[in-house]
């Protein structure tokens, strides 16, 4: 009974939070600087995690500009990363049609990619190059789709070309989710035939979750081929995920707890 009440409350709060987010991007975003929009994005993402009972743990420090590259487990990844390093995300074009969330993403500089289209990939790379050239942070998931989180899917190199063209730094991120027992949180994985609503309900019904983010050392792109850069990033992220020995975080009274180290 308590679990059902908690789930219903969280879902209701998520709905209100999304509506508030739409109000912010409609009434405030057009009139404020990019830095202010990023701070608003970061605060909104952190509050969403708190509503869903997700505790955030971060090791390392993100750079103020460059290309973020991460493994992909769930739609929640966007807001986990956004709470640390507000960025423009490259997402599959289907997200645009999601109720409310799709509209929110469309109004917060999300770059939608039609999967399987080479011409679409070229256009996205041009957009990424422009943003990187302006000193912005952009984020991609080179697996191209979500996984259960236990291992990496093969990385695709196409969207890394923008970092090479602009000689931008690349920041690899390794994401993990754990349940209240410290085990891999299967409720978070958004893969297979699971719908967005089913995924949201599964996350909201979990008593407590933690999202762990390792921000690895930045990778230089000068003089590298796209294929070589892709292989290097997959090795770095895969090695971090495979050799993690971090113990479950101790009980704390706050939903959000940041453990940061200088890189």
Image: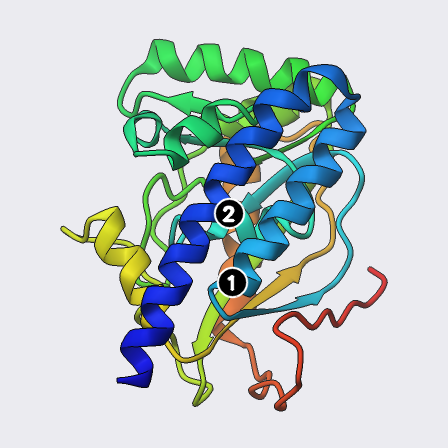
Q: CA distance from mark 1 to mark 2?
A: 9 Å
One can see residue 210 in this view: yes
Identify residue for label 2. 17
Callout 2 environment at 10 Å: few (<14), some (14 to 19), or many (20+)? some
Q: Quadrant of residue 61?
A: bottom right
Q: Position of residue 83 (x, y in %)?
A: 64, 51
Tell me if 157 is positioned left or right of 188 in this view: right
Q: Quadrant of residue 201?
A: bottom left
Q: Position of residue 60 (x, y in %)?
A: 75, 62
Tell me if 168 is positioned left or right of 195 in this view: right
Query: Image point 57% across, 38% down: which residue?
Result: 229
Q: How is the image coloured?
A: rainbow
Q: Quadrant of the N terminus?
A: bottom left
Query: Image point 26% across, 23% down: which residue?
Result: 116
Q: Nearer the viewer, residue 223 or 250?
A: 250
Task: Determine whether 122 is above or below 242 in the image.
Answer: above
* Mark identifier at residue 105: none
Label 1 SS:
helix
Callout 1 environment at 10 Å: few (<14), some (14 to 19), or many (20+)? some
Q: Position of residue 74 (x, y in %)?
A: 38, 53
Q: Nearer the viewer, residue 20 or 64?
A: 20
Task: Determine whether 73 is above or below 188 in the image.
Answer: above
Tags 1 and 2 in contact by the CB under 8 Å rule? Answer: yes
Task: Determine whether 233 is above or below 89 in the image.
Answer: below
Tell me if 72 is positioned left or right of 50 in this view: left
Tell me if 90 is positioned left or right of 47 in this view: left
Query: Image point 28% across, 66% down: which residue?
Result: 202
Identify residue for label 1. 51
One can see residue 220 in this view: no
Q: Position of residue 113 (x, y in %)?
A: 38, 22
Query: Image point 52% across, 56% down: which residue?
Result: 235
């Amino acid at each position: 009974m308590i679990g059902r009440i908690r789930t219903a409350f969280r879902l209701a709060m998520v709905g209100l939070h999304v509506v508030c987010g739409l109000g912010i991007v409609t009434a405030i975003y057009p009139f404020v600087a990019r830095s202010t929009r990023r701070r608003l994005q970061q605060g909104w993402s952190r509050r969403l995690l708190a509503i869903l009972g997700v505790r955030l743990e971060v090791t390392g420090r993100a750079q103020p500009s460059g290309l973020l590259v991460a493994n992909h487990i769930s739609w929640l990844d966007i807001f986990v990363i956004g709470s640390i390093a507000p960025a423009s995300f490259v997402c599959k074009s289907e997200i645009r049609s999601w109720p409310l969330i799709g509209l929110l993403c469309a109004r917060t500089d999300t770059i939608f990619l039609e999967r399987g289209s080479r011409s679409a990939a070229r256009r996205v790379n041009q957009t990424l190059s422009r943003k990187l050239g302006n000193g912005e942070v952009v984020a991609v998931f080179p697996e191209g789709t979500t996984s259960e989180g236990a291992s990496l899917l093969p990385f695709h190199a196409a969207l890394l070309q923008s970092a090479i063209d602009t000689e931008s730094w690349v920041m690899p991120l390794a994401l993990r989710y754990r349940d209240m027992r410290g085990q891999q949180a299967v409720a978070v994985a958004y893969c297979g035939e699971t719908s967005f609503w089913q995924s949201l309900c599964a996350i909201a019904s979990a008593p407590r979750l933690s999202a762990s983010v390792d921000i690895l050392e930045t990778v230089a792109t000068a003089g590298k081929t796209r294929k070589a850069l892709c292989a290097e990033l997959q090795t770095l992220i895969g090695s971090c995920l495979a050799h993690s020995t971090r113990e479950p975080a101790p009980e704390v009274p706050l939903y959000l707890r940041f453990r940061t180290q200088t890189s």
